[in-house]
Amino acid sequence: MIKFFRKLRKQLLTENKFSKYLLYAIGEIVLVVIGILIALSINNWNENRKQEAKVNNYLKSMVIDLKSDTNAYDRIISSFENQVAANSSIFKDKGYQELPLDSIVSRITSYYAMHQIVDQTYQKIKNSGLSDNLGSKELNDAINNYYSNGVNSFNTYLQYDKERSTRDDDLWFLTNNYEINLIYQATETMEFPFSESEETRKKAIIQTIESNLGRNYLRHNINRKRVGIIIAKQTKTEAEELIELINKELKIDTN
């Protein structure tokens, strides 16, 4: 009987040690898991902080691009409005025929915009895979819409207007009917003499202007530039609204 109780006591002591060891092992595992979770959390926080800093830098750079865009829109709108006014004066008042030849030429010349709206920052954002992670959904949608639709449409218009304006120049300046200086040509080329008098050349260009072809070219340029003014104003408004959204995202007070 004594042997039995000794054996039972030994067994209980052994089981108690095992329970303590098991609890200790579980505790160690829990600590390791907690440590891993904390490390992952810190790593994710660091990565999120780095991505947020990168996004903020992109957005600040985009604001610079957009401000450059709005200045370009203003210049283009002003240039187009001046052209519309100059071309329209041909139809409104025949008094233009009394002007010097160079002044007449300035009223019919079709200028196209040299500026291409910049989108370098947006392209960098796309290449970085962050084009849908720039802040609120409203901001993401506005950015993608501006560069995918607004800018592309405006650049397409600029290319079209350049091609058509170049064609207009061919009518006025590459002709066998008279000799003429380009209004924007290099000063040195203006030194070359003409075979006819200015009065003879002036009559010839007025004849071209008053022809059905000449008047149709002017009408087309007026309409084309008016369309350009509308597109430029619309796209400028989109750019200004986008700047406001970005500043709001960056928590920049513009007041």
Image (cartoon, rainbow, N blue to C red):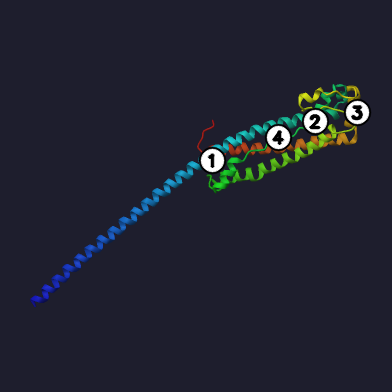
What whole-number distance in Å separates the C-alpha atoms at marks 4 and 3?
30 Å
Residue named by callout 3: 204
Q: Which callout, 3 or 1, points at the residue further toward the start of the chain? A: 1
Q: Which callout, 2 or 4, points at the residue further toward the start of the chain? A: 2
Q: Measured from the top left, where is residue 88 in percent x and y?
A: 82, 30
Q: Measured from the top left, where is residue 194 in percent x and y?
A: 87, 24
Q: Is residue 51 left or right of residue 150?
A: left
Residue named by callout 2: 109
* CB-based contact (under 8 Å), mark 2 and mark 3: no
Residue named by callout 4: 114
Q: Is residue 250 left or right of residue 146?
A: left
What whole-number distance in Å separates the C-alpha atoms at marks 3 and 1?
56 Å
Amino acid, disc 1: Tyr
Residue at the image position 90 percent from the left and 22 percent from the top:
197
Amino acid, disc 3: Ala
What whole-number distance in Å separates the C-alpha atoms at marks 2 and 4?
15 Å
* CB-based contact (under 8 Å), mark 3 and mark 1: no
Q: Measured from the top left, where is residue 80 in percent x and y?
A: 74, 32
At mark 1, the secondary structure is: helix
